């Protein structure tokens, strides 16, 4: 029997790329194999987008462009 994962599956949220978990973690939205409590609404919004992987990539680029201002945008 395979071990159960505690967190939500990223694939269930439409995030199927290998880079999704590290990207979400870098944005501060994913830890311990699940969304951090403050980011649950963001995660479900990503899941509802037509292409969650593309939406996440766009958010990653936005955070890189914002640099040290990202925490203010993420609030």
Image (spheres, rainbow, N blue to C red):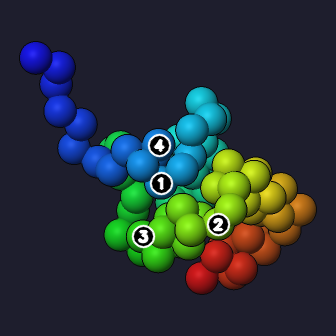
Mark pair 4, 3: CA separation: 15 Å
Q: Quadrant of the C terminus?
A: bottom right
Residue position marked by numbered label 4 in the rendering: 11
For label 3, the SS is helix
Labels 2 and 4: the sequence-earlier one:
4
Q: Which residue is mark 3?
A: 40
* SS for dot 4: helix
Percent coordinates x, y for residue 41 in the rendering: 47, 76
**C-alpha distance separating marks 1 and 3:** 11 Å
Q: Nearer the viewer, residue 21 or 52?
A: 52
Q: Nearer the viewer, residue 65 or 4?
A: 4
Relative image position of residue 54 (x, y in whole percent) = 75, 52
Q: Say whether disc 1 or disc 3 marks the residue closer to the N-terminus.
A: 1
Quadrant of image for the N terminus: top left
Q: Earlier in the sequence, mark 4 or mark 3?
A: 4
* Residue extending furthest toward the top: 1
**Relative side of 66 to 36, left or right:** right
Nearest to viewer (mark 1 / mark 3):
1
Q: Which residue is mark 1?
A: 13
Secondary structure under badge 1? Answer: helix
Q: CA distance from mark 3 to mark 2?
A: 15 Å
Identify the mark at residue 23; answer none if there is no mark: none
At 54% from the left and 62% from the top, the residue drawn is 47
Q: Nearer the viewer, mark 4 or mark 3?
A: 4
Q: Which residue is disc 2 drawn over? A: 49
């Amino acid at each position: 029997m395979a071990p159960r994962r505690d967190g939500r599956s990223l694939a269930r949220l439409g995030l199927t790329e290998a880079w999704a978990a590290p990207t979400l973690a870098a944005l501060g939205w994913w830890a311990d194999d699940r969304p951090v409590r403050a980011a649950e609404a963001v995660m479900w919004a990503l899941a509802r987008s037509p292409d969650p992987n593309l939406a996440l990539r766009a958010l990653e680029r936005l955070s890189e462009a914002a640099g040290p201002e990202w925490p203010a945008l993420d609030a």
